[in-house]
Image (cartoon, coloured by chain):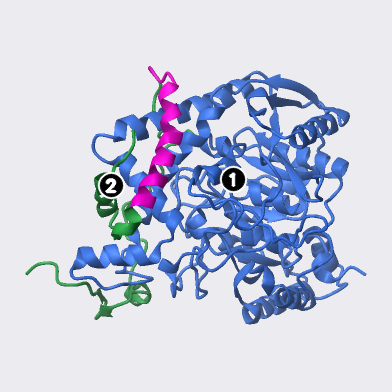
Chain colours: A green, B blue
Amino acid sequence: MSVDATTVRRIAHLARIAVSEDEVAPLQGELNAILAFVEQLGAVDVTGVEPMTSVTPMAMKKRADVVTDGAKADAIVANAPETEDHYFLVPKVVE
Amino acid sequence: MTTLNELTLAEARDGLKAKNFSAADLTRAHLDAMEKARALNAYLVETPDRALAMAEAADARIAAGEARPLDGIPLGIKDLFCTEGVATTAGSKILEGFTPAYESAVTANLWRDGAVMLGKLNLDEFAMGSSNETSAYGDAVSPWRRAGSETKLVPGGSSGGSAAAVAAHLCLGATATDTGGSIRQPAAFTGTVGIKPTYGRCSRWGTVAYASSLDQAGPIARTVRDCAILLGSMAGQDSRDTTCADLPVPDFEAAVARGVKGLTIGIPKEYRVEGMSAEIQALWDRGAEMLRDAGATIREISLPHTQYALPAYYIVAPAEASSNLARYDGVRYGLRVPGKDIAGLYENTRAAGFGREVKRRIMIGTYVLSAGYYDAYYVRAQRIRTLIKRDFEEAYASGIDAILTPATPSAAFGIGEKGSGDPVEMYLQDVFTITVNMAGLPGISVPAGLDAQGLPLGLQLIGRPFDEETLFAAAQVIEEAAGRTKLPAAWWA
């Protein structure tokens, strides 16, 4: 499979990465090089093979459903580009 | 005379214990060497004040007879580990100005044991690369050069700063991470030792995520013993990482002297890849001989799905990366570039903040996870991952204790030499290491000789799950038989 310019723009939008018009052609070439490389996986017979979900067999860790952390609002917003009263500021989302 | 920064970690530890020198002296020797080696661009951030304060605290504990296992040992930290109060960038512009409010589990374990932080080390952006050339903060340069040449060589990647700093005596050891070969390939390129432990041996908590089902932390150091000492401190249980194994940490250092008598070492025939250089083949044969001479049995084995590991990786890893890196949106930390609305803010921030390789991998990951392609790409790759792991399980079940392979297809290359429009050219660097991540196994890279141009070459040993001890024992045999590589004169100082 290979991607065309329209698909490159669609993937870029899904990935939320702005792509200028002159970036589309080189990206298309690079993505197609990778897709051509992974094409060989089609030759493997995977009938009846379970997809891997965990590389080492282990039971999911569980912990008691209690509050173990918190009251760190200052630290949490300390790295944010724009904040106000412990809120993250973003452009208006709902008119 | 050997200056203090040229000691091995084990020698420095013993010298501190014997009070031959102080931790402050040892740290100052490193800070001086770092200052003279800025041309290597190994350190992104130097933390001399913190280092000296940590060294003085270590000296006080040593004087009081309360020494900890790594007291006063100066280390470099790959800039993928969050360090409380010290900038952490993951080699990316998108994390410029980010100062973590917490300490990663691995580094916290090292400080608990008394180690000293010298600074943060250069790396490929978000650990995506095999040459350190994708770093947003410039290339790290290898201290090695080809005989009679001044061409600057890559230290490998993604842990290029870690490998360069260890090789150039700018720290006694360094933390690193390995998702497809990022510890073992740079170690091989710089004549150092690096181990990627079993998936789950070290906590991933507080380490910037690339591909979570493959990422593992491990050390790079100048000897096998030094790696064993460091891994002993870095590893351990952590309830904050649900994939961190609830297993006790063995005495890795004690395993170094075990030898290989009675062990069976597998030589996988599928690793004899097309176009392998005669030099790499000869190195591999010599490595097998060294182990045989030390009492191991050498047996050819088959790992039939080897060739599919690399392409399967370039589906699984980008898929996980596209999900993990969704968090960089210009809202909570790092770079923010305004847009006409919230989507514009995201798109502009990510366009300006991510480099080319990272964008490529996020986009490939987004594509293979998108509607209509998920089964054809992602699920198929995960099935193939099951087959790759099964190959290893069958080899181990047949009585193989460890597997010997080359670490890399060649010695280090020059900066800019692999910059073509085809990203796959660089991906092939990891052809021998990537299977290990796909199967979650431990792998160690140990220097085994020099090539015709005087550059180091490494061999890789792959072990059973949670059997790093056998790897340390076998790597030590190779280190002793091959001799430690000797770095040429410090041209950068």
In magenta, the rendered stretch is A25-48
Residue A28 is inside the magenta segment: yes
Looking at the rendered structure, the secondary structure element under dot 2 is helix
Residue B221 placement (x, y as % from top left): 72, 56
Looking at the rendered structure, the secondary structure element under dot 1 is loop
Residue B365, relative to residue B282: is it above or below? below
Q: Mark 2 points at which residue?
A: A5
| Chief SS of the magenta region | helix
Q: Residue B181 carries which label?
A: 1
The residue lying furthest to the left in this view is A95
Q: Residue B202 carries which label?
A: none
User: Image point 78% across, 55% down: which residue?
Assistant: B146
User: Image point 55% across, 43% down: which residue?
Assistant: B425
Residue B88 placement (x, y as % from top left): 50, 69
B30 horizontally vs B215: left or right: right
Q: Residue B328: name its quadrant.
A: bottom left
Residue B170 is inside the magenta segment: no
B61 horizontally vs A84: left or right: right
Residue B172, relative to residue B119: is it above or below? above
Residue B177 placement (x, y as % from top left): 57, 53
Within 10 angstroms of label 2, few (less than 14), some, or many (20 or more) residues?
A: some
Rounded to the nearest whole Å, what is the CA distance between mark 2 and mark 1? 32 Å
Pointers 2 and 1 in contact (C-beta within 8 Å): no
User: Considering depth in this image, is B404 or B225 the residue closer to the camera?
Assistant: B404
Give the residue type that dot 2 points to. Answer: Ala
Residue B69 visible to the viewer = no
Give the residue type that dot 1 points to. Answer: Gly
Within 10 angstroms of label 1, few (less than 14), some, or many (20 or more) residues?
A: many
Determine the chain carrying the residue at label 2: A
User: Image point 32% across, 69% down: which residue?
Assistant: B332
